[in-house]
């Protein structure tokens, strides 16, 4: 089994619940996968369009962009044997996720209906998309870092 890297993103609305993030991380660890880098990021329109480039122009793209840019998401770079396929199987299908998959179980734990449009999680579907999505995630992490630094500067000015 080849060691692979995948990109996993807990989507806005779900990423605000720490227990959801922990539940997903537990499942990844139990599957023998490791998390190399993780953190909260905010997708703006530009980065959403890059991440979902293959869907720009489709009828469901405008609501998808609105959803993905609606709040903080939690990104993770995950690695391990056959990570890409293994995680896609753990995530479940887009339109009809089965019991035991993340897209079915998390809404059930919240007492919510499963939704195709506003689903819980994204996972890379190929090496090429993993590579592209990880690059976008790293850019977004840098933007968050810069925001933190400018907040620190503001605090410092107040203290002076
Ligand atoms: P993701 O890329 O987020 O992991 P996916 O690979 O299962 O999801 P895609 O076909 O890449 O599914 O679609 C991306 C996202 O667009 C889906 O997660 C879903 O939010 C939305 N989407 C896809 N198909 C539809 C549809 N027919 N109706 C509404 N929303 C859709
Ligand atoms: Mg996809």
Image (cartoon, rainbow, N blue to C red):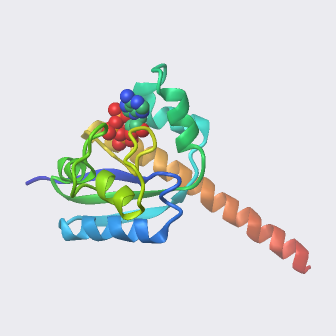
Query: Which residue is located at x 19 percent, y 49 percent?
Result: 89
| Image quadrant assignment for residue 141 | bottom right
* Residue closer to the observer: 102 or 140: 102
Task: Residue 17: give x, y in percent of width and height.
Answer: 50, 66
Task: Residue 129: give x, y in percent of width and height.
Answer: 33, 38
Of the 4 image quadrants, the one containing the C terminus is: bottom right
Question: Is 60 rendered above or below residue 79?
Answer: above
Query: Which residue is located at x 48 percent, y 58 percent?
Result: 14
Of the 4 image quadrants, the one containing the N terminus is: bottom left
* Residue closer to the observer: 46 or 26: 26
* Residue closer to the observer: 95 or 75: 95
Query: Which residue is located at x 75 percent, y 66 percent?
Result: 151
Query: Which residue is located at x 60 percent, y 52 percent?
Result: 71
Question: Is 67 rendered above or below residue 8?
Answer: above
Task: Residue 23: give x, y in percent of width and height.
Answer: 34, 69
| Image quadrant assignment for residue 47 | top right
Question: Is 82 rendered above or below residue 110?
Answer: above
Left or right of 58 on screen, residue 27: left
Most extreme residue toward the left, as rendered?
1
Q: State how many labels appear.
A: 0
Task: Residue 37: give x, y in percent of width and height.
Answer: 40, 63
Question: Is 16 rendered above or below residue 89?
Answer: below
Left or right of 62 on screen, residue 31: left
Left or right of 142 on screen, residue 38: left
| Image quadrant assignment for residue 29 | bottom left
Most extreme residue toward the bottom, as rendered?
159
């Amino acid at each position: 089994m080849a060691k692979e890297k995948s990109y996993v993103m807990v989507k806005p609305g779900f990423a605000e619940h720490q227990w959801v993030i922990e539940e997903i991380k537990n499942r990844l660890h139990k599957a023998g996968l490791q998390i190399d880098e993780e953190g909260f990021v905010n997708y703006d329109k530009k980065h959403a369009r890059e991440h979902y480039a293959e869907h720009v122009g489709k009828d469901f793209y405008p609501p998808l962009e609105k959803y993905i840019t609606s709040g903080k998401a939690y990104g993770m770079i995950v690695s391990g044997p056959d990570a890409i396929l293994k995680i896609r199987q753990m995530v479940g299908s887009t339109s009809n996720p089965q019991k035991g998959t993340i897209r079915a179980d998390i809404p059930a734990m919240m007492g919510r209906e499963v939704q195709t449009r506003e689903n819980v999680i994204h996972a890379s579907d190929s090496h090429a998309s993993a590579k592209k999505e990880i690059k976008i995630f790293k850019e977004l992490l840098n933007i968050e870092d810069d925001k933190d630094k400018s907040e620190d500067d503001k605090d410092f000015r107040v203290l002076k």
